[in-house]
Amino acid sequence: MSNREGSSEKTRRDVKDSLKNVREGVERVSKDIASTTEKWVRETEKMVKETSPRVAATIDETMEKTAAAIKRTISSIDRETKPQQVKLLRSYKSFLSKQVDLIEKRLNELTK
């Protein structure tokens, strides 16, 4: 075998070894990414399972308090004269409409 053929063979082996090392490195990185992704998914699922009930309970409690406040407000308005009731109910409706607008705006921002 000539010097040139030996050099060519060595170059091919070096390239082959380098490719093998790159493949092994890519496989290790892929496994690390997969492992990290699985861990992240498990941790996220755990957080959602722990957090969602608390958030739902808070929303339920807030809605109950809001409903009670509306009932108290209406009861209070009912004790007024009819013209005063109309005025107060219009003001209250305006206030509640602004709250609905804020919720709509927030929903639109979240769904974009």
Image (tube, helix red, strand yellow):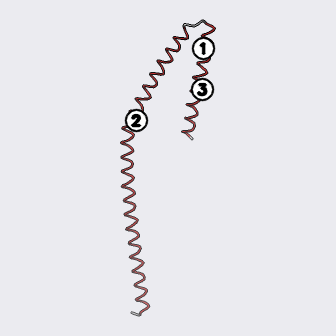
Q: Residue 88 carries which label?
A: 1
Q: Quadrant of the N terminus?
A: bottom left
Give me the residue at 36% from left, 50% from top. 39
Q: Residue 98 carries which label?
A: 3
Q: Residue 76 carries which label?
A: none
**In this orientation, which residue lies closer to the viewer: 111 or 93?**
93
Task: Tell me the element at label 3.
Answer: helix
Residue 71 spot, x, y in % from top left? 49, 15
- Which amino acid, mark 3? Lys
Residue 38 spot, x, y in % from top left? 37, 51
Label 2 to label 1: alpha-carbon separation = 38 Å
Q: Nearer the viewer, mark 2 or mark 1?
A: 1
- Which amino acid, mark 1? Leu
Whether pointer 2 and pointer 3 mark residues with C-beta atoms closer than 8 Å, the reply is: no
Q: In which quarter of the image is residue 57?
A: top left
Residue 47 spot, x, y in % from top left? 38, 41
**Callout 1 crowding tier (Cα within 10 Å): few <14, some 14–19, many ≥20:** some
Residue underneath mark 2: 52
